[in-house]
């Protein structure tokens, strides 16, 4: 199964607009290494036009001053149209970034659910406006109003192109903002399609603008534009620092969802077969290209031999194929640059002295494409690069531990703090360990489940702020205090006692 790749332009002010300089970037199918299309290459002039269109939308008030119920109707319509185009969008996603079609279909389902979720929050917002505040004082009444921020900049990665865009676009629009979305140039096709879907659902011109292109040409000027009221970024820690500094120069708030090196701790009372399944899902899902990947595995020493035996056998049974082939469970890495980076980490793991349990090479039956066998290293040390650094590929680094305290120390011994997992039949132990882990997300007896109703974000070098859930919605609004003096009495702080004595 395949689809024709639409030749889209930038989406600015409700129209498809050719880039000022007319540039385009190739779209490479990572499974075949062949060019299958192009995307427009925005420059600073195009970004300026997109922000201007968003600002015009804000100034008109058509979207920003609309009711939550009206915005909910549009967002529900977007969700419906996404579901109608599920097969097309999922196929486009697989062709663009290499994830298995079944995973891309799951993503599209989540996209629709996310728009519906934030539509419901938008609808409920009307009743929350002018929420009273008990001041504990007579003569005054206070209420809270929640207003959109204005123009917001949304910068998204290539591993979940449509879903990560939705995590930002849906709450931003639900709150009444006008958005400029800059998706990763490595996978932009479905984000461009989202713009057309939103317009077709009735979204006013300028409420959602999409500019594709290279980071320095499009992302940098967008994050630095003083008309932007907030920046929401998902990507690498290094790029996140640059984006945050740009926003900070304008004293603008930002949400940073950055890298991770998450640990999965497996205790010796765990069901080994189930734990192995979650360990695999935690690192090989999305071809290993996921910021929350539990790519550090800690196995209690008593079960390590049995665990590793099953892990090796199960990992070697994963179906590696073109992502559009039914049953595919591991596709190619997103592009040649990422492939070379991940292969470099495999070589670093060997050089540092870790033991290669399985994988670490191109699958023999896939001579073309950016494919790497799912890879497992054991006997890893804290100083090994594959233990310390985010790889963003299907590479698992494992070590053993003796005690609960040792496991916690090893898990927390990272510059990152996005997520972690604990697998044990002792739920009290799971609670203790979870409370000790320095992360923003913790999974108990599983790895990687994600729901738009629950907050998402990390600590330490994994960033700050939260997306999803009501937190993701509230973060796109400004809370205004409205206080009214209700007493019939004069304030009389400066009593009228006649003219002041002459100072002459």
Image (cartoon, rainbow, N blue to C red):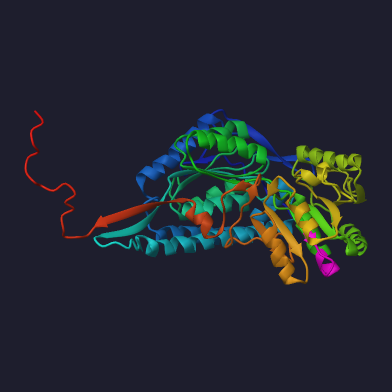
Residue at (88, 45) in percent of width and height: 362
Q: Report whether 32 appears left or right of 494.
A: right
Q: Is residue 302 above or below residue 55?
A: below
Which quadrant holds the N terminus?
A: bottom right
Residue at (8, 36) in percent of width and height: 501
In the image, 278 versus 414, the foreground residue is 414
Total numbered labels: 0
Q: Report whether 107 appears left or right of 375.
A: left
In the image, 479 versus 13, the foreground residue is 479
Residue at (46, 42) in percent of width and height: 229
The answer to whether any part of residue 130 appears in the image is yes
Magenta-colored span: 265-275
Residue 308 forms part of the magenta stretch: no
Q: Is residue 264 above or below residue 205?
A: below
Q: Where is residue 353 shown, x and y percent of the image?
A: 91, 43
In the image, 464 versus 22, the foreground residue is 464
Q: Where is residue 241 shown, x and y percent of the image?
A: 61, 37
Q: Where is residue 106 shown, x and y percent of the image?
A: 67, 60
Which quadrant holds the C terminus?
A: top left
Q: Report whether 355 appears left or right of 443.
A: right
Q: Where is residue 200 shown, x and y percent of the image?
A: 49, 53
Residue 268 forms part of the magenta stretch: yes
The answer to whether any part of residue 325 appears in the image is no
């Amino acid at each position: 199964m395949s689809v024709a790749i639409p030749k889209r332009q930038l989406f600015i002010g409700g129209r498809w607009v050719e880039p000022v300089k007319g540039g385009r970037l190739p779209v490479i199918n990572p499974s075949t290494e062949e060019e299958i299309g192009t995307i427009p290459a925005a420059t600073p002039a195009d970004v300026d036009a997109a922000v201007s269109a968003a600002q015009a939308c804000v100034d008109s008030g058509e979207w920003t001053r609309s009711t939550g119920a009206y915005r909910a109707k549009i967002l529900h319509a977007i969700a419906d149209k996404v579901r109608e185009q599920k097969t097309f969008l999922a196929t486009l996603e697989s062709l663009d970034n290499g994830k298995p079609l079944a995973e891309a279909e799951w993503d599209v389902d989540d996209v629709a659910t996310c728009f519906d979720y934030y539509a419901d929050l938008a609808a409920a917002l009307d009743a929350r406006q002018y929420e009273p505040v008990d001041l504990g004082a007579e003569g005054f009444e206070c209420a809270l109003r929640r207003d959109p921020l204005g123009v917001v900049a949304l910068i998204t990665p290539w591993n979940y192109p449509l879903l990560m865009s939705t995590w930002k676009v849906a709450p931003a629009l639900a709150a009444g903002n006008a958005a400029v979305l800059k998706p990763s140039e490595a996978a932009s096709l479905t984000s461009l399609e989202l713009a057309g879907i939103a317009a077709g659902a009735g979204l006013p011109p300028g409420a959602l603008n999409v500019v594709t292109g290279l980071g320095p040409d499009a992302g940098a000027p967008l994050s630095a534009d003083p008309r932007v009221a907030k920046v929401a970024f998902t990507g690498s820690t290094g790029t996140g620092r640059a984006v945050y500094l740009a926003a900070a120069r304008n004293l603008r708030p930002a949400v940073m969802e950055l890298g991770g090196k998450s640990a999965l701790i497996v205790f010796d009372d765990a069901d080994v077969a189930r734990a192995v399944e979650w360990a695999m899902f935690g690192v090989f899902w999305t071809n290993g290209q996921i910021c929350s990947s539990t790519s550090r595995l800690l196995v209690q020493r008593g079960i390590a031999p049995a665990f590793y035996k099953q892990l090796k056998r199960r990992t070697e049974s994963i179906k590696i194929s073109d992502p559009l082939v039914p049953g595919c469970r591991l596709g190619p890495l997103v592009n040649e640059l990422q492939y070379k980076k991940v292969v470099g980490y495999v070589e670093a793991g060997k050089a540092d002295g870790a033991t290669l349990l399985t994988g670490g090479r191109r699958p023999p039956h896939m001579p073309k494409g950016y494919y790497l066998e799912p890879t497992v290293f054991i006997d890893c040390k804290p100083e090994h690069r594959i233990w310390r650094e985010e790889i963003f590929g299907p590479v698992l680094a494992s070590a053993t531990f003796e005690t609960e305290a040792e496991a916690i120390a090893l898990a927390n011994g990272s510059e990152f703090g996005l997520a972690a997992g604990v697998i044990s039949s002792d739920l009290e132990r799971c609670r203790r360990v979870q409370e000790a882990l320095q992360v923003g997300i913790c999974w108990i007896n599983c790895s990687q489940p994600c729901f738009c109703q629950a907050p998402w974000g990390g600590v330490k070098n994994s960033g700050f702020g939260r997306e999803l859930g009501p937190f993701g919605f509230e973060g796109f609004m400004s809370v205004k205090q409205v206080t009214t003096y209700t007493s019939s009495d004069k304030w009389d702080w400066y009593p009228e006692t006649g003219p002041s004595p002459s100072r002459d």
